[in-house]
Image (tube, grey):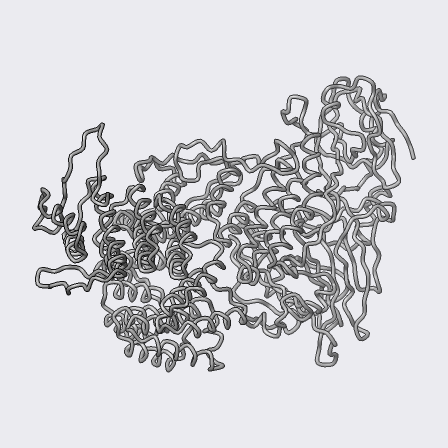
Amino acid sequence: MVRYNIAAAVLLSVPLNAVDGFQPSPLGSYHASMRLSGTKSGGRGAVAASTPYFDDESRGGKGTLGDISGRFNATTAYRGISEAMLMDDEEDEEFRSPAERRRKVIMAKDMVGRERFAYDVTLPLQTDMTKAQTSMGISVRQVFPGGKISERALDLETLQFQSSVEELRGGTKDRTGTGSVETLESLKQEVIDDNFKGIIVSSVVRGGLAWEAGVRAGDELVATSATMGNKLWPKSTLDGVRSAILSRKIMCPSVSFKLTRSGAYMTTSEVVEEFEMSLTRPLGIQVEDYEDGYVRITGFVDEPQELVAKNLRIGDRVVAVDSSLGSQMWPVSNVEGLASACTSRLPGQPVKLRFERIVEVGGWNSGDNGNVKGAEDPVTAMESVSPALTATADGFRKLKVETSNSEGTPNQAIQSTGSNTHKMLLSRCRDIMRRYMDKDTIQSNADTPGIVADRVLETLADASAPLDSRTLSLIMDGYLASRRPADAIRAFEACVGLPGDGSLKDVAEVVIAGKKNPGASIVPDMAALNLFTATALLKAFAMEGDLYSARRALAAMEGERLEVGGVNAEPWQRSQHENWVTDARCYNVVLSAAAKAGSPQATELAVDLFDSMAEPSPDSLVGKPSKTAVSYNTMIAVFANAGRLQDAYTIFYSMKQAGLKPDKFTYTSLIKAAVESGDAKQGQSLLTEMEGEGIDADVLSYNTVIKGLCDQYRWYDAKELVTEMEWNGVSPDSVTYGLLMNGLLKAGKPGPCLTLFESACADPRTTSRAQNVQIYTTAVTAASTMGDHARALGLVARMVDAGIKPNIKTFTSLMGGCISSGKAGYAVEVFNKIDEPDGYALTLGIKALCDSGDYAGASRILSEQRDGYKLMSGKQIMSSYNYFIQSALERFRYTDARRAMTELLQSGYIPSKASFDAILDGLGISKQRNDQKRPKVVRTNQVSIEAKTKHDFLLFVLDMMEMRNLLIPSSFYASVLFEGEQIGGLRKKVSSLLAKARAESIKDGEEISSDIVECSAEASCLGWED
């Protein structure tokens, strides 16, 4: 080890490392070595390259990695995607100094600055004479300028072009096991952008030769073997790759490929940050030679210059120095060369040095780019996300602290935002998000993507890291997949720093804070705003049903100051590099929000927005996106929800005139418009028209018409349409059966409804369609309607055994059946199993408690809900009080009935005519009519006591109404008079006084207001009961 202090170096004339003819390769962003291993399969197998990784052992080795069995070459000093980098290792070795050979850099940047690392694989060629025991299992596609991918893929073994379906053919059902196919789908956004063009690996069969050699979907194929020899020639088209392999087959049994991979999927545990500084002599740093070939800073003089003290750290590597003449940077191999380069300067001439700093980011397992066992489990997601990102986040946080001065202002030598560590942190966050964003995970548990998004944001907040647009887009998509639009909006506002609704509201308080580090939070950055994040924001507002905010956000995206919903939109300020414009998708999202809103105001807003779009023709004005088929379809849906059938047809015909061909979505929207207008017959005609146009109707189209027929109680027509759809090859789904069963219930046929359900369960072809909570709930409702509580209970037990969790509608239907069957005890048990009852469930619960005699429990619910601003509505509370009072009177619980009546009036409710009818029914008193005569009562002691108690309650009600100057129905007033007359004695006299008292007739004598006694403020006033 050589030590050297270059604090005061003497002047030399020529850098020692400026070797004639030596052209140093530019240093990449990461430092690593690639460990390779060879495997054989049946005497002719692929030589596999394990995933590149980083360790300290390999740094002291030789400069190149030699051939393995003559089949595998790895060029670890990759110089970018150009022909110059494709030289053989032997040729490249001649131009490397010993120190340079000890420093292996596999990371590089291509022509557009994307970080990649390169590797070579050699695979056997299958010919008619030789058959490999294992196939290559690799297909590639061509990427054209603008990021467009070729429709067909090239199988590198058969050299046949194939579709996406053919590419997946033969894969196993296990999406992660041997024989399954890894595809490009989840990696498109990471590896392909508008600047990307070339050949990309679109699929790899797990367990195949290519997979075992380390090839993964998303890798870029940049070169293939020449027809003869070991040379590798660059390739940029599928035809070029196919031609090269065909000619290679004739001469050689194997072919080599050079591929590159995005830096997002490196398993490195450290990142190299590179920065440059211009320093004046004396530099004030102490350096040493290390065995790994680097020159490192080991110390500083007592009072170094300010720039050195603020920007350099012990352990930083000096990797290059500028030439004394010109601007070229020369690699630094040792201390002597560095000293020579620094001293060969004129007095006062600064020295420009390039430094590298190692940042520990922890190991990484990419999880095969998105296929993780147990990914659908939210608990697994919560437990795995934060630990996986902690080391990377800590590395970034440490770098951020190091690169800020005492005042907290970033210095000029190295910036944490946009650094390699920052990029690595964000790329790993995206990798985590993609693991839990596949369709299988979302279908298994839709909550998982949102939970993962929470953990990722918390980790980034702990690191005080800003987000880029790709990372924010994935996080927002995760929230939307979990049906959490409010969190997607909050993430946008916190990460971008703009009000999502396009207004002028202050979003400074919208902060996503870290959990581990107090005071740490997401740093807003305008770089997170682009077309994808803005479109995700519009989707969030559409999902929330907030049309006005979506429209203002669209105006803000376009730089318009537009008043929407009484609030002005404020144009968003974009970063200087963002020049994106809104597209038709943005407009279509807002149109869909208007369709969902369905109000007249929403319809008018949608009409204005639709009219502002350009016509779909080459002559349309530039500035607004052109209408697409989706635009027309969505506008038809807007009019369908508004019940404006004629306007929907107008859009339909204008779509045809614009040269756009209607598809099944167009006709389905039009069918919905006809059905919503009550014209199910027109919907059937449109189905016939679809068939004539050669458009296959899907199950949604048929279900829309079936719903219209069932709503009109035309169940037999609906059943015939189901037969027709089956004849046309469209299988009914669970929605179809649900519509038919609901149609039978509406038609008053609960028995046939249950028969249809049982037949669907018995048929193996339709069993799966009947196994959902909606179908079972409808069946439970049918059984409850028939009063068959035992069958309803049995259906609930069956659905639980089938692994289907009953919802609140299932429980309320079951409660209704138990109550109507007189099994109040069962209904109470079901009610107690509902964790979060709604207003309707509480109403049924009160009925069940009353029927079971638990008036205390029923009264407790009523007392909690009586303000009408909680779960139960005012109407539900009123009906529940009526039921409570009637039930209590029927059971001679007069005290409970009095208490309920008092509480009802004290809560500000006014008893309705139904309330007084419930009281009379509870007391068993028939209402008096002008043409009816009451039967004469046989007065016995027992009858007299019961009648007196009932009459006392009637007088109590009169007194309570009188105290609040409320009106009394005439039928109730007459019942009080007749009951008193029939009882006789004192009550007869009271009834006589009531009849003689001054009464005021109101509105045809239907209601009577009695002003019997006027009491002074000092005197106590006696009521009729007193």
Q: How many marks?
A: 0
Front residue (pair 951, 124): 951
Q: Is residue 986 left or right of residue 996?
A: right
Residue in the picture at 15% in, 55% down: 981
> Where on the picture, by quarter, is residue 311?
top right
Q: Horizontal and vertical percent for residue 628? A: 36, 57
Direction right: furthest residue: 1
Q: Horizontal and vertical percent for residue 778? A: 39, 69
Q: Is residue 201 left or right of residue 794?
A: right
Q: Is residue 238 visible?
A: yes
Q: Is residue 383 left or right of residue 228?
A: left
Q: Horizontal and vertical percent for residue 488? A: 49, 46
Please determine whether, in this image, residue 705 is positioned above or below residue 860: below
Q: Is residue 623 visible?
A: no
Direction front: furthest residue: 941
Please determine whether, in this image, residue 322 is positioned above or below residue 851: above
Residue in the picture at 63% in, 54% down: 379
- Quadrant, the C terminus: top left
Front residue (pair 268, 621): 268
Please determine whether, in this image, residue 844 is positioned above or below residue 334: below
Please determine whether, in this image, residue 442 is positioned above or below residue 714: above
Q: Horizontal and vertical percent for residue 357? A: 75, 36
- Quadrant, the N terminus: top right
Front residue (pair 908, 360): 908
Front residue (pair 265, 451): 451
